[in-house]
Amino acid sequence: MVVGILTLTIPSSWNHHRRHCLRPTPPLIKCESGGVPLTKQAHRFFSSLTSTAAVDDLATANRLIKKFVASSPKSIALNALSHLLSPRNSHPHLSAIAFPLYTKISEASWYNWNPKLVADLVPLLDIQGKHDESQALISQVVSKIKFKERDLVQFYCNLIESCSKHESKQGFNDAYGYLSELVNNSSSMYVKKQGFKSMVSSLCEMGQPNEAENVVEDMIKNGVKPSLFELRFVLYGYGKMGFFEDMERMVKKMEIEGFSVDTISSNMILSSYGAYNALPKMVPWLQKMKALEIPFSIRTYNCVLNSCPMIMSFVRGSGGFPVSVSELVNVLDEAEALLVKELVESSSVLDEAMEWDDLELKLDLHGMHSGSAYLIMLQWIEEMKSRFRVEECVVPAQITVVCGTGKHSSVRGESPVKTLIKAMMVQMKSPMRIDRKNIGCFIAKGQVVRNWLIQSLD
């Protein structure tokens, strides 16, 4: 790889044949770290490596790897490798076998060469001090695709993003140099846009938002108009570091560039304030969203309520909690109470989560964290009371609350939202019970729920 003169800002710190029959999808095991879910076969493979202490015995490890790859379908073998290459690998003690596993997989007759896997493997090798191996892999990829600029920029983009997610400083600095050189020397606008995009996002991932903003300036100098993507990343990069003045300056910069602040940007700002317990700053931002008619989303609720320590203590505790919005506001401190008031004054999130017709009234809590589910439930109950007061209101035949079974929880099968809703139902003496046919739902007859709510009004 020839190194040229760079004019960009450099960071100061640097198919096997298709089968005619479809295979059933292998069952997956959710990993608590949030990484790539494992198949049962891959989980057994990792267990065998651990139980035989093969991690410290190269010969035994290679024997087990060879046996696993030879006996496993393509999807199973690649699932095991992808899990080890994930930044959220729940088996970090096995990361050393990623390279020998990749090597053995690459020798399989069904393997289709994939530079993305190399990009994901390189930072692990750098972290393990295997720089010669990582450089050899990069050189191998470059030699194969060096005349295909689009493929090459995609590889470098994958490489720098993977290095930043793994926090591999040497790998990141090397990848940044490769990508900068390619972007600088290319006449392709596609190559420039993709390269700049990855440099900005990766610099922010590495905690260097100021350098990322410099790259945005370089984009403009090179005739590339920054997109909302880059500006959002820099905004959030400053926010995650707690540099609120710079974050707020980026909001103005976005508006100057012709981009309106939207729900996604607003959620980034709210999340940043919340991470540093700056609750008083969140209230005016919610008010600004209303003034600009920026809709709230489930994530808006999550960002705000996850930042409220008193509300979190209610939903995570084993004791009782307020069962109406007014009760909740009365027991909260001023900052949290103001936030709750701002949220409940807008019913858009509740409206989107609720379906109401003659046959069924359904409340879907998917995507909500515990604090959000709690507040939405309180709002939902008040909405039902309000509607059922009207004699002309048609009572749905069935009422359903969908909580899920914990498939997306940190511990598979344990749903914090379901646990919370069950506790709320018990405390309020609700007639709703877990559905025997779908344990992720609470159900009851509509008329029974109506009678219960009307009685609570008396």
Image: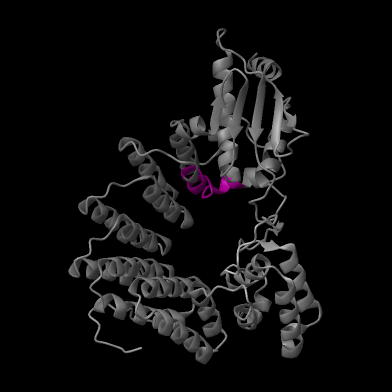
Q: Is residue 441 above or below residue 58?
A: above
- Part of the protein shown in magenta: 300-312
Q: Position of residue 106 (x, y in %)?
A: 59, 79
Q: Residue at x 42, y 53 (%)?
A: 273
Residue 71 or residue 292, whichever sits in front? 71
Q: Position of residue 302 (x, y in %)?
A: 52, 46
| In the displayed structure image, the side of residue 156 where residue 389 appears, left or right | right
Q: Furthest-bottom residue in view? A: 132
Q: Position of residue 358 (x, y in %)?
A: 59, 17
Residue 308 is covered by the magenta coloring: yes
Q: Is residue 63 above or below residue 303?
A: below
Residue 139, located in which quarter of the rendered image? Answer: bottom left
Q: Furthest-top residue in view? A: 391
For the C terminus, which image quadrant? top right
Q: Is residue 327 visible?
A: no
Q: Residue at x 49, y 70 (%)?
A: 165
Q: Name the colour scheme.
A: one colour
